[in-house]
Amino acid sequence: MNRVILLGAPGTGKGTQSALLKDRLKIPHISTGEILRSAIKNETPLGKKAKAFMDNGELVPDQVVIELIKERLAEKDCKSGFLLDGFPRTIEQANALGILLESLGQSLSKVVNLNVPEEAILGRIRARGEESGRSDDDPQVAKHRLEVYRNITAPLIDYYRNLGILSEVSGIGTVEEVSDRVLKELHKGDQ
Ligand code: AMP
C-alpha cells in the first residue's frame, strides 16, 4: 500500500514528479495547491477564502486545508493509497493528518523529501512562471514562498525523520532520473 507524502520547497519538482508517480504507482495525486487554484478559478467559497493568501505567497489557514484534505481522503479512489503533494505544510496539518489516518485505521508508508539547492530553485520558479503564468511565481512572491517554506514547512523534515519514515532524494537530474530515485525509495522494504 502506498500512502505517500512528497515534501520539498516550491520549485523542487513535486508537481512534475507527482504526475509521473501517480501513473507508475496507480494512486491518486492530491495537490492542495491545484485544488485551491481550481477553486479560485471557479470562484467557489473555498476559492474566495484562499485567494488573497495565495496571491501573497502566504499559507492558506490550517483549518481550511485540513477540511479540504479530510473530504478528499474520504473519497473512494484513496482506498488504494494516495500521493500528497503540498500537504502537510505545517506541524498542525501534519498532526491533523496523523489523527485522521489513525481514525481510518491507516498509516503513512513513506515521506519523500526532494532536495534541490536554493540557488537552483529560484531559477526553476522563474522559468515556470514564464510558462504557466502562475501569479505566485512572480519573483517577489516566490521569494516569500521560499521564506515561508524555510520557516514553517521545513521543520516537517525532522518531524517525519523522527517518525522513521523519511527518505531524502536528490531532485537534481532529469525528471526520469529523479522519478526512478523516488520509486527506489518507495520500494525499499518491499519483499
Ligand atoms: P503549491 O501549488 O503546492 O505550490 O501551492 C500554492 C499555494 O497554495 C501556496 O503558496 C499556498 O498559498 C497554498 N497552499 C497549498 N497547499 C497548502 C497547504 N497545505 N497549506 C496552506 N496553504 C497551501
Image (cartoon, rainbow, N blue to C red):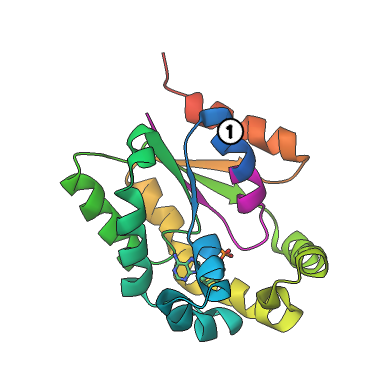
Task: Tell me residue 46's x, y (percent).
Answer: 42, 75
Q: Please state the horizontal and vertical placement of residue 184, each as a whole percent of the image.
A: 57, 27
Q: 180 above or below 128?
A: above
| Image: magenta residue range | 1-18
Foreground of the two, 26 or 172 = 26
Looking at the picture, tell me which residue is in the foreground, 164 or 96.
96
| Circle 1: residue type | Asp
The image shows residue 59 at horizontal and vertical percentages of 48, 76
Whether residue 120 appears in magenta in the rendering, the answer is no
Q: Residue at x 73, y 40 (%)?
A: 175
**Image point (29%, 49%), residue name:** 74
Foreground residue among 112 and 13: 13
- Mark 1 neighbour class, 10 Å CA radius: few under 14, some 14 to 19, many 20 or more: few
Visible in this render: residue 110? Answer: no
Q: Quadrant of the N terminus?
A: top left
Q: In the picture, residue 136 is in which quadrant?
A: bottom right
Q: Which residue is rendered at x = 61% and y = 51% of the image?
A: 14
Residue at image mark 1: 23
Q: Is residue 52 left or right of residue 66?
A: right
The mark total stands at: 1
